[in-house]
Image (tube, helix red, strand yellow):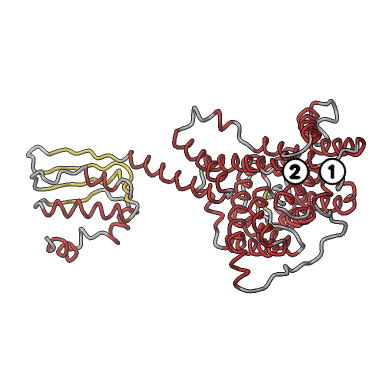
Amino acid sequence: MLLLSKKQDWLGNIRGDVLAGTVVALALIPEAIAFSIIAGVDPKVGLYASFCIAFITAFIGGRPGMISAATGAMALLMVTLVKDYGLQYLLAASLLTGVLQIISGYIKLGSLMSFISRSVVTGFVNALAILIFMAQLPELTNVTWHVYAMTASGLGIIYLFPYVPVIGKSIPSPLVCIIGLTLVSIYLGLDIRTVGDMGDLPDTLPIFLWPEVPLNFETLRIIFPYAAAMAVVGLLESLMTATIIDDLTDTSSDKNRECKGQGWANIGASLLGGMAGCAMIGQSVINIKSGGRGRLSTLVAGVFLLIMVVFLNEWLSYIPMAALVSVMIMVSIGTFSWGSIINLKSHPLSANIVMISTVTVVVWTHNLAYGVFVGVLLGSLFFANKIAHFMYIESSLNDDNSTRRYIIHGQVFFNSATKFTSEFDFKEVVEKVIIDLTHAHFWDLSAVDALDKVVIKFKREGADVELIGLNEASATIIDRFGIHDKPEEIEKVMGGH
């Protein structure tokens, strides 16, 4: 069964995977260069990284058909490190990022994706789109009108070319944009910035390169905050992308294996002179839409990318920056979830607050991890508050007014514990109190403590208390941590008053 699964991953869709991988490789070139420039490093750093990460995740990643490479989310986290300490420290941080991600995979942090709500994912995607757009603004500031004209023309080509009969659907419009604007720029001799002005493009295959940094605690102190942030953001984007591809293909993936795969890929990238990366939402969707389903599509994308940049590097240096800005604006527009704005009217207020808070924190801090943390925290608080409202208590008195029966409905936990204790009338004079827990569940120590208080207060008033209907899980936690049925513990409490 395992061999059959592996054969299906590699050979089950050869034609579709090869064609899709080729399309993705063509689209990866401008993005890898653009993300390198965002991070403040030579284009070859992003290109080598994209090849290496795609190549390694094709073999050991947990999600067949998903594209991983250098990304804008990771590049944005590298800017300060590169500016203050240089490329070698970035390579060291990328290597440490991989180590942290491998550890995350072994301790099964991939399972934590179940705690991230759809509102947080939407906020994450929207914030990423905004940050990518903001990263293009320096290229559009204090420039000549030619740059604005080229950028507008590029966007026109990207969005209108798909409507051209026959070839419109078969050739990626971003590629047409880049080639077209490059030819126009060369023909007219425009004096505008090109990729060649940003740094040297690779003309050789990547070689093994150990980061030239001191191996001491001072280096660790410098790179660890960046590595930790990149590890978290990289895993968040990779796991969210894997979830999206799961939905698109109606298949499942191994999230913990993906954590380890991303880690090994980033280690490999750093040792070949590349920067850390992660899964790409846009490129992964392009791959799936183009017919890619297996690991072969990811492998083809990485290998074809390297072949093009090594043997066509001279041509790549002529690409005007305005063309890349057009492509990145397209990526930003395509990444943003425009439906989320329309859904603000129909979605619950709590979901909207979570989404908007995630976007706000990410854009304010430029750190996707902070935004996701705030979103998950707010989502958990809203959920706890909502569940607490569903707990209520019914009560009835028997015919001779000697026994009061309380029937508990709902979930008793830290947020509903106070409400639970307030529903009982401890001053009522009755001989016996029956607390029916058939329709209730006790979740934590706060719930157990609340039950102890109720029982002990009734006993203090002279009533006999009987608990009935406890389910097995509730009974287990109450027996272990409760004191209301332990005479010696009750004596301590009662003796203190």
User: Where, quadrant-wise, is the N terminus in this rendering?
Assistant: bottom right
**Is residue 15 shown to the viewer in this render?**
no
Please state which of residues 1 and 93 is positioned toward the viewer in this rendering.
93
Residue 164 picture quarter: top right
Q: Is residue 490 above or below residue 347?
A: below
- Residue 458: where, in percent of width, then height? 14, 51
**Among the 4 quarters of the image, the one containing residue 284:** top right
The structure residue drawn at horizontal position 77% and vertical position 31%, both measured from the top left corner, is 152
- Disc on the earlier residue, 2 or 1: 2
**Tag 2: residue type?**
Gly
Q: Which residue is mark 1?
A: 319
Location of the C terminus by quadrant is bottom left
Mark 1, Cα crowd under 10 Å, few <14 / some 14-19 / many 20+, is: many
> As displayed, is residue 444 above or below residue 95?
above
| Tag 2 residue | 292
**SS for tag 2?**
loop
Front-most of 494 and 309?
A: 309
Report the amino acid beneath label 1: Ile
